[in-house]
Image (cartoon, rainbow, N blue to C red):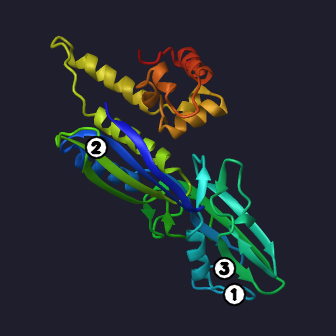
Amino acid sequence: MFQIQCLESKSETTTSLYSKFSIGPLAKGQGITIGNALRRVLLSNLQGIAITGVRIAGVKHEFSTIQGVKEDIIEILLNLKQIIFKGNLDSGIVARLVCQGPKIVTAKDIELPEDISLVEERQYIVSIASNISLEMEFLIERGEGYSLNGKKISIDQPGFLAIDSVFMPVQKVNFFVETSRSNASSELENLILEIYTNGSIEPLDALSSASQLLEKIFGALSITKSPMRTSFVENQMEDEKQQEFDNIMIEELELSVRAYNCLRRANVHTLSDLLKYSQEDLLEFKNFGQKSADEVAESLKKRFNKTLRK
């Protein structure tokens, strides 16, 4: 059984976190395989929160200017693109900003709900040079990867300008393989993994989330032998039941906020996701205690007459 060891960890700024991990010992050749898979998932599939659109009072298009404001609209959009959020967000929200000049406006001036917060409150937005009022509304969403501003604004309100949105919480990943120091044989190796994040997630949490995503992906490829006498109808009924569980969100369990947030952080979004785990597996989730595990099992049995995997 290999081990994961944190060799180095530092915070250069609030928006730049770095950790270096050693994973091993691994059989020869496995380091490259695991490193490539983790790197691709870390950079492409982890979700983040970003501004996807903004509505500015008195502004109809991005080539406008605002009298009494130092920056033009293009510059303001670029500044908004740099704002980084962290927290829990299931659906898009609209946040507001109202400022009276003269004033230097920063991310701290945005009125946010309790579920999300700013990584860097001092992120600059705009300078108001005269005695005018500036009003903005922001569409904030969860997503993955990089979204160009050509995508449709997912809100049925007019006047929003689209913004290039950077959802990726992981900024850079490096990896290399070295011979395991714990074994004299060259047949064993260690994977050295360097992860840089934007501060919205710890590198260790990013590694954990990426590992769980890969486990879910490869778990779907596992093939088990079934008796030849199992009929097509029985298989079809099982598939339909599984699809039904795929569409039932864990919100239906009406769990406490603590248990719900722990499941979401572990990428458990549906009943189907939850039923892949045993009660002991749940206890391995970060901040997930015995009380929360009992609550999940009880609600699952009471509402859907289902039990967790043994």
| Residue 253 figure quarter | top right
What is the secondary structure assignment of the residue under circle 1? Answer: loop
Q: Residue 29, percent across and down?
A: 18, 45
Distance between mark 1 and mark 3 Cα atoms: 15 Å
The front one of 291 and 273 is: 291
Look at mark 3 in the image and give the residue it sits on: 59
Are the residues tagged 1 and 2 within 8 Å (C-beta)? no
Taking the spot 46% from the left edge, 65% from the top edge, the residue there is 151
Taking the spot 57% from the left edge, 46% from the top edge, the residue there is 90
Distance between mark 1 and mark 2 Cα atoms: 58 Å
Q: Residue 219, percent across and down?
A: 30, 32
First of labels 3, 2 by sequence position: 3
Residue type, mark 2 in image:
Arg
What is the secondary structure assignment of the residue under circle 2? Answer: loop
The front one of 227 and 202 is: 202
Taking the spot 69% from the left edge, 87% from the top edge, the residue there is 70
Are the residues tagged 1 and 3 within 8 Å (C-beta)? no
Tell me if residue 202 can be seen.
Answer: yes
Q: Which of marks 1 and 2 is in front?
A: 2
First of labels 1, 2 by sequence position: 1
Q: Against 309, is 40 above or below?
A: below
Q: Residue 228, percent across and down?
A: 15, 14
**Mark number displayed over residue 181:** 2
